[in-house]
Amino acid sequence: MLTKLKKAGLVAGLSATLLLAACGGDNNNNNDAASNNGGDVDYGEEMNYTITGIEPGAGVVQAAENSVDVYELDDWTVDTSSSGAMATALGEAIKNEEPIVVTGWSPHWKFAEYDLKYLEDPEGVFGDEETINTMVREGLESDMPEAYELLDNFYWSPDDLEEVMLMVSEGQEPEEAAQAWIDENEDAVNEWKDGISEVDGDEIELVYVEWDTEIASTNVVGLILEDLGYDVTITPLDNAIMWEAVASSEADAMVAAWLPDTHGDLFEEYGDKMEDLGPNLEGAKIGLVVPEYMDIGSIEDLK
Ligand code: PBE
């Protein structure tokens, strides 16, 4: 059943992984690849043995580099650029039906826009399902109890986040998209704000990285804090610097910690110098992502 579903393109992304995990069957896909007469070799050549990565500091890029070692993809390299450049390259490849392997993550609008699949990762290099956690600086609870409470209450679903991301990918300004989502989801927003008193222009700074997920979440939280009366600054940084900023109390908070694996090293380095308010989203995932039309199912097939 799984193979049929996969062939029909009915499952993608996280659900495929969960189904595969549930069925315990990564053989299905290897068979798919084997039935392709050596197409995987051609794929490598066609792609110049390049995995299309994103920002160098991203956890998913580091994991992709590890996967090259673990799966002994000797000729392969991970190209780094930006999340935007990756999305452009993916769109171009799909327009021309060319092979491409990108460092991918969910939730992400690309799964709504294109037929894509995660390559299976039998060695578990990319980890399992993750959460995105909210981290605040030490002392925020006593200094800004209202913001602390809002940040603690902020919790939404991958579908919610995808709605905002999709609007941005379709050309809306992040702030506009975030406001549109807030306007359409008053109940959720009111629950997060419930019982919190307004403040009078206190300054607060959120830090993030310009990944599609974090652009969306940070803008939503920023607007809600503004609505509570805060003077909000949102500052895009490199990943490690974002963590350092909260650890050193230079910034107040971030909603962008991918745990336990993607940012595991950073959590180890900085986690005890900040307060972890727990997940603001569950069911996140990273991995290598390819268009559904590519006739491979596992990272092993890249060899
Ligand atoms: N990402 C999106 C980040 C976390 C959020 C998967 C690109 C990373 O790899 O670090």
Image (cartoon, rainbow, N blue to C red):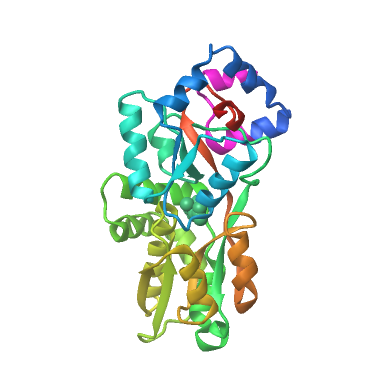
Q: Taking 283 as reference, is 166 left or right?
A: left
Residue at the extreme front: 75
Residue at the extreme right: 24
Q: Position of residue 49 (x, y in %)?
A: 46, 33
The residue under the point 27% across, 56% down is: 173
Total count of labels: 0
Of residues 73 and 151, the one nearer the viewer is 73
The residue under the point 54% across, 83% down is: 140
Quadrant location of the N terminus in the rendered image = top right
In the image, residue 145 above or below residue 29? below
Residue 205 found in image quarter: bottom left
In the image, residue 8 above or below residue 244? above
Residue 141 shown in magenta: no
Quadrant location of the C terminus in the rendered image = top right
Q: Position of residue 271 (x, y in %)?
A: 62, 71
Residue 15 shown in magenta: yes
> From this viewpoint, is residue 149 visible?
yes
The residue under the point 55% across, 66% down is: 134
Of residues 62 and 233, the one nearer the viewer is 62
Of residues 243 and 234, the one nearer the viewer is 243
Q: Position of residue 102 (x, y in %)?
A: 45, 39
In the image, residue 100 above or below residue 264? above
The residue under the point 60% across, 72% down is: 270
Of residues 151 and 91, the one nearer the viewer is 91
Q: Position of residue 157 (x, y in %)?
A: 53, 51
User: Magenta residues?
Assistant: 1-17
By secondary structure, the bulk of the magenta-drawn segment is best described as helix
> From this viewpoint, is residue 195 visible?
no
